[in-house]
Structures are given as structure tokens and as C-alpha cells.
């Protein structure tokens, strides 16, 4: 029986549609394969530019594996085109192939932490879909390609720690979606292009540690999404634009290490309510620290050292998130009794870890309640001020302290006996005060202590042998006190001492213990101006890293030990004003590093040639 006409027509129609679809499918597949081949060839050209692949990560980039299965590569589902390359931290060595510009579907390029060199190929500017360009921690040189501005979808550019030169291209100001521009640790010159102010999407501008200069452009204050401005360690001058101080989105403002002038706005803490880090150290700022700073309640780091700020430090009690306060090397304080009053406002800031107020004009005494700080304070740095009075015993309650610097003030009285409670202490500096009494033997409990400065005080008595328990000590300076007795073998045998041991200008007697030969890594030894006697120990010849050796103005006798022939790194040797005899050994003529040799009161003519 014959089929109805409409059914025959329907069958023909279905067949035609299927046939047409099949033809389209073949055409589409052929097109995809063709474009896929473009990507494959581009990646093979990329591989050809790699001279070292220690982890063999590119071994899968071959003809037996589909490119979408190659290591570090991802393809889009629809077109099977390369959309992502991630070869970060593979220790690859080589340069970037210009054929990367043929990967027209590429959105993400991660190549950080390798050793790519030469220029960034300008062909990358052809990647119109590129959103993320991460090339930090390589050795790229040359200039930043200006035609990156053609990558209209770029959101993140990270070129940190390379060797890029030239100026920041003004053309980057035409990237409508740019959110991050990170350029730190390069060799860039010129100024910040004002056109970057046109990028309303920009959130992070980070270019510290370059050679940039000029003024910070006013246009940065137009970027309502800008939250992180990092321009430290450059050569910027002028002032910070007022518009930037009024940008409430700012979270981080770091312009330290430049030549910027001016003052901080009186309403700073009100106009920048989201501020977490204010770092403007080592510039030429002046004026006062405005009390409004306490309104920036999110502030975590306030760093303004190395400027010309004057006046009193306001209350900082509202800064409950403050972790680090550095106001070092300004002209703050008046030398008056109330200068340290602001410390009370910090006593309940539970997050405070570091307090640097050294190098100012602060007077007064350290209050006993200093030990009531509720924070895990690790650094308390107050040296080079005009602070007087005793060291309060309460300071030994700050058991998290790692660095305690109180030198070059007018402190008096004894070193607190309970100083040994500070068992996290690594640096203790009490030099240049009027401290008296004995060195507490409890210092021997500080097994993490690395540096101990007690010089230029009026300390008396002997060196406690318990210091020999400080097996982390690399520097010990007890010079210019009234210490007496013999040098304890336990102390002079501390083989951890590698920087300096200075016992000069005291009243030590007796011989130098033979254990001094344990100081095989010590760089400087000064035992001058004591009343030490006996022979110079032969074991000193084992201190082969010595560069400075001074034993002048003692009562040493005998010859210069022949073991000194091993001290070939010496730059300064002072043996004067002792009772030594014999000739200057000829081996000193072969000491090519020796710059100054003082023996008795004369110098042989040979040393002057």
C-alpha cells in the first residue's frame, strides 16, 4: 500500500534536515579542529622556547595526547579551545613565544615563580579575551607592552619581581575592567600616568620598590573603588593629593620611603573610616598626629617613622585592632613628665604586637602599670629618648616580649632581678643609661637571647657564669662599666657568639681562659682597657673568622702566639700598651686583609710600604 503524500513529504523533510545537520556538524567539527590546531601549534612553539624543564611538566605536550589533556592546560567545553595555562612554580627557564598571541580564547595565564626572561612579547596584546595575566617572580626585562591596552577584558595584571624598565604605559588607563595592577620590585621609571584615574574599576595599585618619581596624580582620587595604594620606596615628591585622603574606600595607603611633604589632614580618621594600614615612614611629613586618627577604628598598622612630626601623641584607645605602632625618629614629645601618657590608652588594645617609639623627645618615667598590657606585645622599643627613672619591675610581666630596647636614655637603678621571666626574649638593649648594681644571674634563663647590650652603664661585680647557658647568643656587649673579677670560662666558651664579644673598658683581671678558642665563628673580640694578665692564649688562633681583635692596654706578656698565622681574615689588630716582647711575626706580611696593625707604640717600616 502506498504511503500518504504528507508522510512521504515528512520523511523526505526529516532526511533533509538530518542530512543538513550532519553537514553542519562536519563543518563545525572541521572548523573546531582547525582552530584547535592553531592552539596546538602555539603551545608547541611555547614549549620550544623552554630551555630547562626540571620537572618534565611539558613532557605531555606531544602528538600522542590531545591538547586539552596537556599538563597545565584547560579547554573550554564548547569550542575545545585553550582558555587557561597554569605553569606556576615549575622552575621553567626560557622566554615567552610570540605565538602565545594566537591563543585567541585564552582567559588566564599563570606563569609566576619561574625563570622566564627577555621581553614580554607584544603579541599578548592580541588576546582580547584575556582576564588574568600573572607573571611575577621571573626575570622578564624590557618594557611593559603598551598594546596590553587592547586586552579589553583584562582584570588582573601582576608583574611583581621582574626586571622591567621604562615607564608605566599610559595606555593601561583605557582598560575598562582592570582591578589590579601590581608592578613592585622592578626598575620602572617616570611617573604614575594620570590616565590611570580613568579606570573606575581599579582596586589595587601597587608599584613599590621601583624608580618612579614626580607627584602622585590627583586623578587617583577619582577611583571610587580604589582600596590599596602601594607606592613605597620610590622617588615621589610633592604632597599626597587631598582627594586621596577623602577616598573612603582606601584600606591600605603605603607611600613610605619617598620624598613626600605636607601634613596629615586633621579629619584623617573620619574621611578614611576603612583604613587598615597607614605607612608613610621616611618622608618629610610634619605637623601633629591628629586626634581624629582614633576614629579609624579598623587601623591595624600605623607606621610614620622618619618624619618631622611634633607635639604629643593623642589617645589611641579606640584602635582596638592596632597591631603595630611605629612613630620612630620624629620630634614627638617635649621631654616632659606626661609624654608617655598615651601608653595608658594602649594598655587595653589586645591586638598590639609591636610598639616603636624610639628616637624622639619623650621624657618622663616608664609607669609601673606597663606590665598590665593585655596584648601579646613582642617588641617594646623606646631607646634614644629622654626617659628617666628605674626600669619598672612590672615590665617582666610582658612575657611575650622578643625585643626590648631601652638604650640611650637616662634610666637608673638596677636591672630587674625577674628579667629572667622574659623567656621569649631575643634582643635586650639597655646600653647608654645610668644603670647600676649587678648583672642579674637570672639572665641565664633567657636561652633564646641572641643580642645582649649592657654597655655604657655603671654596672659592677662580676659577669654571672649563668650567661654561659644563653646558647643562642651571637652578640654580647658589656663594655664601659665597672665590672671586675675574672672572665668566666663558661661565657667566653659560648661558641654561638658569631658577631661580637666586647668586654672592653672594665676592670677584669687574671688570664684570658683558654676556652676562648671555642669562638671559631666570632667576627669581633675586644677586651681592651682591663687589667688582664698572662700570656695571650694560643687558642686564640682557632678563632679563624676574626676580623677585629683588640687587646690593648692590659698586662699581657710574652710573644705574639705563632697560632695567629691562622687569623688571615684580620682587618684590625691592636696589641698596644701591653708588656709583650719579641718580634712581629713575618706572617703578618701575608695578611692581605689587614688594614691596621698596632704593636707597642711603633710600626715597622715594612708595614708602611
Image (cartoon, rainbow, N blue to C red):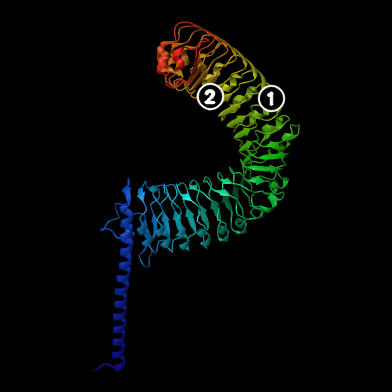
Q: Residue at x 46, y 54 (%)?
A: 144
Res. 475 mark? 2
Residue 312: tell me if it is visible.
no
Specify few, some or many for label 2: CA neighbours under 10 Å numbering under 14, 14-19, or 20 or more.
many
- Name the one closer to the observer, 229 or 425: 229
Residue 271: tell me if it is visible.
yes
What secondary structure is found at the residue carrying circle 1?
strand
Q: Quadrant of the C terminus?
A: top left
Picture coordinates of residue 293 (x, y %)? 69, 46
Picture coordinates of residue 214 (x, y %)? 58, 49
Q: Quadrant of the N terminus?
A: bottom left
Is 277 drawn above or below residue 483 in the view shown? below
- Name the one closer to the observer, 71 or 311: 311
- Name the one closer to the observer, 452 or 431: 431
Picture coordinates of residue 394 (x, y %)? 67, 29
Q: Is residue 535 left or right of residue 409?
A: left
Res. 411 mark? 1
Amino acid at each position: 500500500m502506498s504511503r500518504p503524500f504528507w508522510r512521504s513529504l515528512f520523511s523526505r523533510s526529516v532526511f533533509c534536515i538530518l542530512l543538513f545537520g550532519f553537514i553542519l556538524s562536519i563543518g563545525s567539527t572541521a572548523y573546531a579542529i582547525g582552530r584547535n590546531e592553531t592552539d596546538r601549534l602555539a603551545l608547541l612553539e611555547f614549549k620550544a622556547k623552554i630551555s630547562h624543564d626540571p620537572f618534565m611538566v611539558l613532557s605531555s605536550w606531544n602528538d600522542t595526547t590531545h591538547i586539552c589533556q596537556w599538563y597545565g592546560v584547560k579547554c573550554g567545553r564548547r569550542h575545545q579551545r585553550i582558555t587557561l595555562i597554569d605553569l606556576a612554580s615549575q622552575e621553567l627557564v626560557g622566554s615567552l613565544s610570540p605565538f602565545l598571541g594566537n591563543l585567541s580564547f585564552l582567559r588566564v595565564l599563570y606563569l609566576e615563580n619561574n625563570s622566564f626572561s627577555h621581553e614580554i612579547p607584544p603579541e599578548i596584546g592580541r588576546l582580547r579575551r584575556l582576564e588574568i595575566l600573572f607573571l611575577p617572580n621571573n626575570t622578564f626585562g624590557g618594557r611593559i607592552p603598551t598594546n596590553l591596552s587592547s586586552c579589553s577584558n583584562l582584570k588582573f595584571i601582576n608583574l611583581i619581581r621582574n626586571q622591567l624598565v621604562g615607564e608605566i604605559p599610559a595606555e593601561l588607563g583605557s582598560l575598562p575592567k582592570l582591578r589590579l595592577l601590581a608592578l613592585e620590585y622592578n626598575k620602572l621609571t617616570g611617573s604614575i600616568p594620570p590616565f590611570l584615574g580613568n579606570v573606575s574599576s581599579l582596586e589595587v595599585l601597587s608599584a613599590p620598590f621601583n624608580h618612579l618619581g614626580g607627584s602622585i596624580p590627583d586623578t587617583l582620587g577619582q577611583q571610587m573603588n580604589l582600596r590599596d595604594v602601594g607606592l613605597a620606596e620610590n622617588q615621589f615628591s610633592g604632597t599626597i593629593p587631598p582627594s586621596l585622603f577623602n577616598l573612603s574606600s582606601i584600606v591600605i595607603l603605603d607611600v613610605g620611603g619617598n620624598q613626600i611633604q605636607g601634613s596629615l589632614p586633621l579629619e584623617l580618621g573620619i574621611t578614611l573610616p576603612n583604613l587598615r594600614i597607614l605607612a608613610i615612614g621616611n618622608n618629610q611629613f610634619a605637623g601633629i598626629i591628629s586626634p581624629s586618627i582614633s576614629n579609624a577604628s579598623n587601623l591595624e598598622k600605623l607606621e610614620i617613622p622618619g618624619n618631622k612630626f611634633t607635639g604629643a601623641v593623642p589617645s589611641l584607645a579606640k584602635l582596638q585592632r592596632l597591631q603595630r605602632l611605629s612613630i620612630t625618629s620624629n620630634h614627638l614629645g617635649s621631654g616632659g613628665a606626661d609624654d608617655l601618657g598615651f601608653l595608658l590608652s594602649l594598655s587595653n588594645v589586645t591586638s598590639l604586637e609591636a610598639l616603636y617609639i624610639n628616637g624622639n623627645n619623650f621624657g618622663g618615667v616608664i609607669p609601673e602599670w606597663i606590665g598590665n598590657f593585655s596584648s601579646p606585645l613582642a617588641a617594646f622599643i623606646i631607646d634614644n629618648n629622654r626617659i628617666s627613672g628605674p626600669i619598672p619591675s612590672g615590665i617582666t610581666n610582658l612575657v611575650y616580649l622578643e625585643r626590648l630596647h631601652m638604650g640611650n636614655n637616662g634610666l637608673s637603678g638596677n636591672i630587674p632581678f625577674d628579667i629572667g621571666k622574659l623567656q621569649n626574649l631575643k634582643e635586650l638593649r639597655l646600653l647608654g643609661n645610668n644603670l647600676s648594681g649587678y648583672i642579674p644571674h637570672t639572665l641565664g634563663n633567657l636561652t633564646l637571647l641572641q643580642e645582649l647590650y649592657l654597655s655604657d652603664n655603671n654596672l659592677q661585680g662580676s659577669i654571672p657564669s649563668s650567661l654561659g647557658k644563653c646558647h643562642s647568643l651571637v652578640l654580647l656587649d658589656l663594655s664601659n662599666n665597672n665590672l671586675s673579677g675574672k672572665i668566666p670560662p663558661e661565657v667566653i666558651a659560648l661558641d654561638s657568639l658569631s658577631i661580637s664579644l666586647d668586654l672592653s673598658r672594665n676592670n677584669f683581671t687574671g688570664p684570658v681562659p683558654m676556652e676562648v678558642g671555642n669562638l671559631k665563628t666570632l667576627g669581633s673580640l675586644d677586651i681592651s682597657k682591663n687589667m688582664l694578665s698572662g700570656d695571650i692564649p694560643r687558642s686564640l688562633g682557632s678563632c679563624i673568622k676574626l676580623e677585629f681583635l683588640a687587646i690593648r692596654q692590659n698586662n699581657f706578656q710574652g710573644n705574639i702566639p705563632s697560632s695567629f698565622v691562622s687569623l688571615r681574615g684580620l682587618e684590625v689588630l691592636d696589641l698596644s700598651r701591653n708588656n709583650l716582647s719579641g718580634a712581629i711575626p713575618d706572617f703578618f706580611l701575608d695578611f692581605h686583609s689587614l688594614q691596621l696593625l698596632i704593636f707597642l707604640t711603633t710600626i715597622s717600616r715594612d708595614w708602611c710600604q
